[in-house]
Amino acid sequence: MIALVILVLLLLILGGLGFAVHVLWYVLIFAVLLWLIGFFVGGSPTAGSRRRWYGRW
């Protein structure tokens, strides 16, 4: 009985971790897309001093 309870707890923990990692992939993709949009918008000639924030001159 104790082994069954431990097995169920392990499955719940690992299942929750898998869901959290899956959600983090979506967060990562969203953050990369925002960074790319900001990088290309910040590269316009009218951006002025904002271009230095990306390390480009």
Image (tube, grey):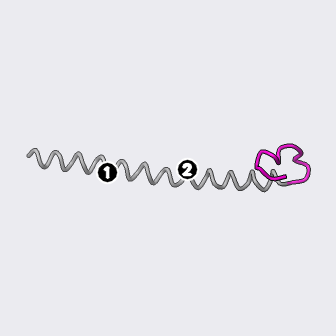
Q: Does 42 sit left or right of 26 as displayed? A: right
Q: Does 12 sit left or right of 6 as displayed? A: right
Badge 1 vs badge 2, beta-carbon distance below 8 Å:
no
Q: Is residue 25 above or below residue 9?
A: below
Q: Residues within 10 Å of mark 2 (few under 14, many from 20)?
A: few
Q: Does 14 sit left or right of 28 as displayed? A: left
Residues at marks 1 and 2, CA–CA distance in whole angstroms? 20 Å
- Residue furthest to the right in view is 46
Q: Where residue 37 appears, x then y in whole percent?
A: 73, 54
Residue to which mark 2 is pinned: 27
Badge 2 marks a residue whose secondary structure is helix
Residue to which mark 1 is pinned: 14
Residue at 24% in and 48% down: 10
Q: Which mark is residue 55?
A: none
Q: Mark 2 or mark 1, which is nearer the start of the sequence?
A: 1
Q: Amino acid at mark 1?
A: Leu
Between 56 and 33, which is closer to the camera in this rendering?
56
Q: Where residue 33 appears, x then y in whole percent?
A: 66, 55
Q: Where residue 27 appears, x then y in whole percent?
A: 55, 50
Badge 1 marks a residue whose secondary structure is helix
Q: Amino acid at mark 2?
A: Val
Question: What is the magenta range?
Answer: 44-57
